[in-house]
Image (cartoon, helix red, strand yellow):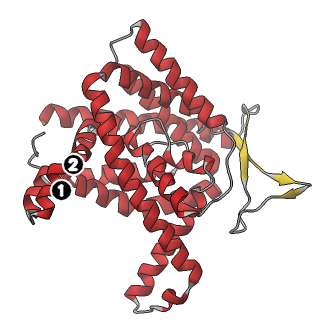
Amino acid sequence: MQTKTRTFSDKFWLVLKGLAMGAANKVPGVSGGVVAFVAGFYEEFIASLQRFNGKALQFLLRGRFKSFWQYINGKFLGLLILGMLISYFSVSLVLDLALQHYPLLVWSAFFGMILGSIYYIGKDFEDWSRRTIMLMLLGVIAGVSISLLEPAQENDNLIFVFFCGIIGVSGMTLPGLSGSFILILLGNYVLLLVDSVNALYTTLVDIITLDFSFIDDAEQMRLLKVLLVFSAGSLTGLVTLSHFLGYLLKNFKSATNAVILGFITGSLGVVWPWKKEVYKVVEGVRLLDINGNPVLDNYNRFLPSEVTLENTLALFFIIIGIFIVVALGKYGEKTRSHG
């Protein structure tokens, strides 16, 4: 893999792509990997992550930092990660608010984006053999099955949190598998992507204002420790999964793309816009987790039966979602043709 010379425009777009990946990966049912796949930098992303190997470690141990940076395609990964970090403290917070106040419109936009992704990836898929169709169906079944699983309760055991990091980052590397939705199923979405991220934000503000009282705040320190272990698990997952997926893409590209397409199709149920949250109830009382948040049981999905302004807007947002993905894909094609 050769390191590309990137213009300012390329760098700016890479940050935006990282921002989109970070935002998408935080929304349950949406995969950041889909953004990479449709925008045309998925294989470079996986290949760059694969460079975190023994040779990269040798460069670090010998103090050859410039060689290490060039070897891992550091400019590319660095700009993407910068976009993801910006996303977690900006766009993803806006998305959280939008999901609270306008859930139907947000889910509609993401449903449209998934539809657009299926069209865009499927239109260039040529190996329609019996084998790939079977693998695609298995991907659909796996995606639908995951959407029907019952969420677990919150667990802050650090070993389990590390495991959540490995699994939760899957949405970055495997299009169609939503890491944030997996975290909901594992019961740790609020703990890892809301509470701990908010604790980090609060801590950074405290440090900037030279207020170090957070050191004596047991709850804030617990959340920071959880976030650190989760981040370590995520880094481990990124590297290990990238090597596995890189091998599959190199040796079984059609089969891998068939499963990915199936996964994305199967994830449509997760982002179906018309749904109501169903919370766990024990003896007539809504069950709460250790932070006082209601425990999600599942979603009650339904078809809209009336023509209302809200439902009309939802359909409009589905179209917008499709348009965004198609435009992103066209840009990816243009980038590849000039690369």
Q: Which of these two is toward me, 55 or 73?
A: 55
Answer above or below: position of 171 versus 66: above
Instruction: Say which residue appears at 24% left-offset and 31% top-offset.
Output: 333
Instruction: Say which residue appears at 50% left-offset and 91% top-offset.
Output: 213
Q: Relative to 24, is 303 on the left or the right?
A: right
- Residue 59: where, in percent of width, then height? 11, 58
Quarter of the figure that contains the C terminus: top left
Q: Quadrant of residue 35?
A: top left
Does the residue at mark 1 contact the one at mark 2 (Cβ under 8 Å)?
yes
Q: Which of these two is toward me, 303 or 260?
A: 260
Answer above or below: position of 253 versus 69: above
- Residue 334: where, in percent of width, then height? 21, 34
Q: What label does residue 219 carry, if any?
A: none
Residue holding disc 1: 57
- Residue 240: where, in percent of width, then height? 34, 45
Q: Relative to 120, is 220 on the left or the right?
A: right
Instruction: Say which residue appears at 62% left-offset and 46% top-offset.
Output: 185
The Cα–Cα distance between marks 1 and 2, rounded to whole angstroms, is 6 Å
> What amino acid type is highlighted by mark number 1?
Leu
Q: Is residue 94 visible?
A: no
Q: What label does residue 53 carry, if any?
A: 2
Instruction: Check the image and name the residue furthest to the right.
Output: 283
Q: Relative to 245, is 108 on the left or the right?
A: right
Q: Secondary structure at mark 1?
A: helix
Answer above or below: position of 181 versus 93: above
Q: Quadrant of residue 79?
A: bottom left
Q: Which of these two is toward me, 145 or 162?
A: 162
Density class for disc 1 (Cα within 10 Å; few <14, some 14-19, many ≥20) is: some
Quarter of the figure that contains the N terminus: top left
- Residue 276: where, in percent of width, then height? 73, 45
Q: Is residue 116 visible?
A: yes
Q: How many marks?
A: 2
